Image (tube, grey):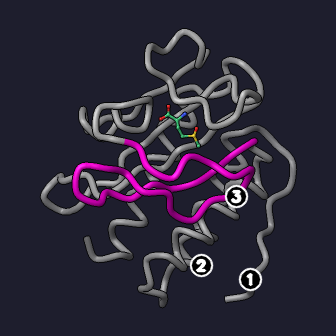
Amino acid sequence: MAEDLYISGGTKEERYEALLPQLQGLLSGETDEVANLANVAAALKETFGFFWVGFYRVSGEELVLGPFQGPVACTRIRKGRGVCGTAWQEARTLVVPDVDAFPGHIACSSLSRSEIVVPLTGGAGEVWGVLDIDSSELNTFDEVDVRFLQEVCRLLRHNADK
Ligand code: SME
């Protein structure tokens, strides 16, 4: 598959719909986890221009920074801490319209204003990492992002044979 994305304008939903099959193609045939996480972070950043897009992976009782696109970020987050650690602990997607209103939010950048974190789960439902996206504007993420980003995370499970 060519390593180019083809996403024209349209609504956010249309852009996700155009992106998903291309991501599927990009991930198929590659089983290396870091390579796939890196390409998904790049594709989401390129398509939507989010401020920060990246992955943290579970290592013991911490999340450790993985492939990402955007400014440098915190490298380790303990279970139950911040938005990422909470999404991991509760094994559910968290949408934060205003990070200043989320108790315990970890500010890797003062420019981040809203955030979504989607757990990466394996076949037995165990969380092996999270997808974290930050926006420099308030109220960026809604049900459309939840639906499609959960689909993206499912693609990663399938491909990583988790
Ligand atoms: N804000 C996150 C930390 C990770 S950075 O946003 C990249 C949190 O509260 O878990």
Q: x, y percentage for residue 127?
A: 25, 52
Mark 2 burial class by Cα count in 10 Å: few <14, some 14-19, many 20+: some
Residue highlighted by disc 3: 69
Q: x, y percentage for residue 101?
A: 54, 9
Residue highlighted by disc 1: 3
Report, in whole angstroms, how far the alpha carbon at label 3 lies from the one at label 2.
17 Å
Residue 152 appears in the rendering: no
Marks 2/1 in contact by CB < 8 Å: the verdict is yes
Mark 1 burial class by Cα count in 10 Å: few <14, some 14-19, many 20+: few
* Above or below: residue 139 compared with residue 66: above
Q: x, y percentage for residue 26?
A: 59, 78
Segment tinted magenta in the rendering = 51-77
Rendered residue at 44%/20% (across/down): 104
Identified by mark 2, the residue type is Leu
Report, in whole angstroms, how far the alpha carbon at label 1 lies from the one at label 3.
17 Å
Residue highlighted by disc 2: 26
Relative depth, front residue between 98 and 153: 98
Disc 2 within 8 angstroms of ligand 1 (CB): no
